[in-house]
Amino acid sequence: MHGRMRRDEVPESGTWDLSDLFPNAEAWEQERIRVQRLLDEPAPWKRHEAWDAQALLAALTASEALGLRVSHLAAYARLRLSEDSSDAESQSMAGKIGEVTARYQAHTADLQSHVLRMEDGSIEQAIREEEALAPFRKYLHDMRAAKPYRLSEESEYVLASLQEVLHLPYQFYQRSKLSDMAFSAVRDSEGAVRPVSFALFENDCELNRDPVLRREAYRSFTATLGAHKHGIAAAYAGEVKRQTVIARLRGYDSATHMLLHSQQVSVDLYHRIVGTLFNELAPPMRRFVRLKQRALGLEQLSFCDLKVPFDDASFMAAISFEEAGQFIVEANRVMGTEYTELMKQGVSRRWVDCVDNIGKTTGAFCLTPYGKHARILLTWAGNMSNAFLLAHELGHAGHFMLAGRHQRFVNYRPSLLFIEAPSTLGELLLAEHLRNRTDSRAMKRSVLMYQLNHTFYHNFVTHLLEAEMQRRVYAAADKGVPLTADSLSAMKGSVLSDFWGDAVQLDEGARLTWMRQPHYYMGLYPYTYGAGLTAATVMMAQIREEGSAAVARWLRALKAGGSMGPLELLQSAGIDFSDARPLHNAAAFVGSLVDELAALS
C-alpha cells in the first residue's frame, strides 16, 4: 500500500507557487508586524474635525490600502493552512492572522461609524465635489443601506473585535475534519490495500468503477464521520446560533434576512431559486440515476453509487492534468485572447496545487488575491470529473483576475449571487468543446454523462440539497429547535428523500452528508451555485446564438466585479432574474440532456 505523502514529500511541480505573495514565512511575519503596528495607531481619520470631501477621500483611501495589505496576509495564511492544516507553523500563522483580521474589522467598523455620522445628502455632495470619490459610491451606498441594522458605535467595535472568536465553529470543523479524522484503509476487488482520506474518497473512491473499493471506502468514510458527528454538530449549531443571535440583535426578521441583505438579494428571490430548482430538477435527475442504475447493472442504486461514471469505456476515462489543461484552453478560445491567456497561465505556471498530502484541505477552491494571480487547490485523481472541476476553478480565476485589473480593491468582489456563474460557465464551455470536436456517438454520450455527473449533479444538485438543508436548519433555529447530530441527520435524510424519492437507496451514511461540506459555515452560499449555473446556462445559449456580441457582454460583466449590484450585473450580461423563467429554462435544459443521454444509450 502506498500511504499518503507528507507535504515535504510532495513534488514541487504538483504544488502552487506562493512566492509572489510572500517569498517565505519570515517575510510574511515582518509584514504582519508592520500592519499590526499600523492597526495599533490611532486611525488617521480621527484627526479630522470636519468631514469634507478631501477628508472622506483620505479616510477611504487609507482604509482601502490597509485592507489590501491585510487581504494579502490573510490569503497567504489561508493557502499555507489549506495545503497542510497539520503543520504547526501554518497553524500559528492562521492564529496570528485571525487577530489581525479582527483588528482590521474593528478599524473598518470605526470608519463606518464616522461616515454614517455625515448628514443625509452630504456623501453625494462630497462625490460631486471630489471626482476621485466616484469609485467609492457603491461602497458608501451599501454602508448607508445597512445603517438601520447597525448597533451602537461601541457595540459595533466590540463585535468586530470578537470576529476571531465568533468564527471558532468553522475553525473547529476544519481542524477536526482535516487533522483529527482518520479513515481505515480498505481493500479493492483485487485485494490491494487502498488508503482513504476525505480528498481520496471524494476524488477517487467515490467515482471508482470497482464496486468493492467504492463500497468499502464508503463504509470506512461514513464510520469515521459517525464517530465525530456529535462534535461537528455542536460546531454547526454554534455557527447557526451565532448568525441567529446577531440577526436578532441587529433587528433583522431572521438570520436568513441578514445573510441575504449583505448579498443584496431579496428573500423572495432566494426562496424562488431554491424552491423552483428543488422541485423541477428532481424529475430529470431521478431519470438520470435510473439510467445509471441500468448501465451499472444494479438492482438498486445506493447513495454511494451516485457519482460513479456509467462505464469503463467512457471517453477519456483517464486523463492527465496537462491534457485537461489543453482541453480547457481550447474550450475558452471563444472568450477571446485576454481570457484565453489567463487559462494558459493557469495550467502552466503553478497556479494549481493538485497533489494529495496529509493535512491538505478537501474539495477545491480558487483564491485570487487582488493584484496577484489566482491560486487553485484541488486533488488530481486523473479523471474527467477532475477536468470539469479544474475548468470550474479556472472560471473563478479568469473572473477575479479580470475584475482585479479593471476595478479598485474596494469594488472587485461581486455579490455571492453572481460568484458561481463564471465558474460553471467554464464547465459548460468545456462540455461544448468536447462534444463539438467529435462525431463519435460513444464519445458524445460519454461527455454528456460527465456533464450531468459533475456540472449538473455536483453543482446543481449537491449544492442545491445543501441549500434546501440550510432553509430547513434556519427555519428550525428561528423556532428555537435545538440542533443536534440526530436532528441534523434526520433533516438531511428528509431532504434527500424528498428529492430522490425511491430512485436512490438512502442509508445512515447518506444522512451524515451535512458533515462533508464547509459551505454550511459560509453563510447562505450553497444556493448561489443554482443561481450561478442558471445564469451560466442562459449565457451559454446566448453565446451559441449571438457569438462575439454575447461574449463581449459577459466579459464586460466580469470586468465590472462588484461595482454594481448582482441583478444589475446579470442584466448587463443580458440575463434577467426578475422572474422564474431562467430557472425553468435551466431545469428544462437538464431534462433535455437526460433525454439526449437516454437516446444515445
Image (cartoon, helix red, strand yellow):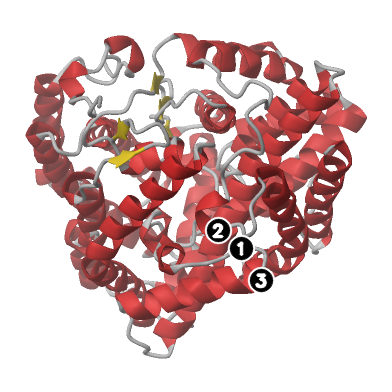
Name the disc covering residue 197, or none: none
Which one is in front in this view, the residue at disc 2 or the one at disc 3? 2
Residue 163 image-quadrant placement: bottom left
Q: Position of residue 451 (x, y in %)?
A: 69, 37
For badge 2, the amino acid type reads Ser
Given residues 188 and 536, the one toward you in this image is 188
In the image, residue 79 sits, relative to residue 11, either above or below, namely: below
Q: Position of residue 328 (x, y in %)?
A: 63, 19
Real-space Cα separation, disc 2 to disc 1, in angstroms: 6 Å
Asked whether residue 24 appears in the rendered view, the answer is: yes
Is there CB contact under 8 Å for labels 2 and 1? Answer: yes
Q: Position of residue 291 (x, y in %)?
A: 75, 50
Residue depicted at 14% across the width and 38% down the height: 86
Mark 3 Cα-neighbour bin, 10 Å: few <14, some 14–19, many ≥20? some
Mark 2 Cα-neighbour bin, 10 Å: few <14, some 14–19, many ≥20? some
Quadrant assignment for the N terminus:
top left
Q: Is residue 319 left or right of residue 163?
A: right
For badge 1, the amino acid type reads Val
The residue beneath circle 3 is 501
Q: Is residue 590 left or right of residue 490?
A: right
Residue projecting furthest to the front: 190
Label 2, secondary structure: give it.
Answer: loop
Is there CB contact under 8 Å for labels 1 and 3? Answer: no
Name the disc covering residue 504, or none: 1
Is there CB contact under 8 Å for labels 2 and 3? Answer: no
Name the disc covering residue 302, or none: 2
Mark 1 Cα-neighbour bin, 10 Å: few <14, some 14–19, many ≥20? many
Quadrant assignment for the C terminus:
top right
Label 1, secondary structure: give it.
Answer: loop
For badge 3, the amino acid type reads Gly
In the image, residue 402 sits, relative to residue 266, either above or below, namely: above
Q: Is residue 579 left or right of residue 512?
A: right
